[in-house]
Image (spheres, rainbow, N blue to C red):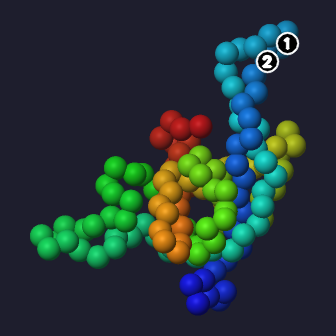
Amino acid sequence: MRDLRSNTRKLWYSNGEELVDILDEYGFPTGDYQTVRSDPVMFRANLSATRGTQGFTGTGESNDYFGSDIDYSLIISTSRMDLPIAEDTIIWNAEPQKTEDDEWDCNTNAFRVTAVARGLHHMKYAVKRMSEVRANGGS
């Protein structure tokens, strides 16, 4: 009963496979790179309602699961230890759609993994909404 199905929801993940040069209008490299992502893969996991704390310390201060230095919006947890999810993986909480450029839309319903915590029988992923990542100057 580690992952009770009624408590899980469908999520999709996509890893960055390679960096490719961005070319200018003449076909020359600009020095910038773009991440080519794999096709999204569906999996089921628990998605926290909001960022929370894992109890309190003896001094009355909150004890954040990933520490106070990691910036994240939600926590995703699962007992599946075989998922190839790592930092910078993109996770969607609704079925991903393609943009007009034939790339996966990483702006709508998307999160970026900011930290991974591996337990003995479970994985926890700290994720940040892509809209918040972009607003704070991330890519």
Q: Residue 3 occupies which quadrant of the picture?
A: bottom right
Q: Classify residue 78 by image quadrant.
A: bottom right
Residue 23: mark in rendering = 2
Q: At numbered mark 1, what does the secondary structure look like: helix, strand or loop?
A: loop
126 to the left or right of 82? left
One can see residue 94 in this view:
no
Question: Any mark on residue 10, and which?
Answer: none
* Residue identified by numbered label 1: 27
Distance of label 2 from label 1 (alpha carbons): 5 Å
Residue lying at 67% horizontally and 62% vertically, measured from the top left: 83
Q: Nearer the viewer, residue 89 or 27?
A: 89
x and y percentages locating residue 56 in the rendered image: 23, 74
Kindly give the residue lying farthest to the left in the view shown: 59
Is 100 placed left or right of 85 in the picture? right
Task: Residue 63: tell me if it is visible.
Answer: yes
Q: Quadrant of the C terminus?
A: top right
Q: Position of residue 65 (x, y in %)?
A: 37, 65
Say above or below: 3 vs 68. below
Q: Nearest the camera: 115 or 25?
A: 115
Label 1 near label 2: C-beta < 8 Å? yes
Residue lying at the far front of the rendered structure: 120
The residue sitting at 76% across, 27% down in the picture is 20
* Type of the residue with mark 1: Gly
In this image, 10 relative to 112: left or right?
right
- 5 horizontally vs 62: left or right: right
Q: With respect to residue 130, does 4 lie above or below?
A: below
Q: Position of residue 92 (x, y in %)?
A: 68, 61
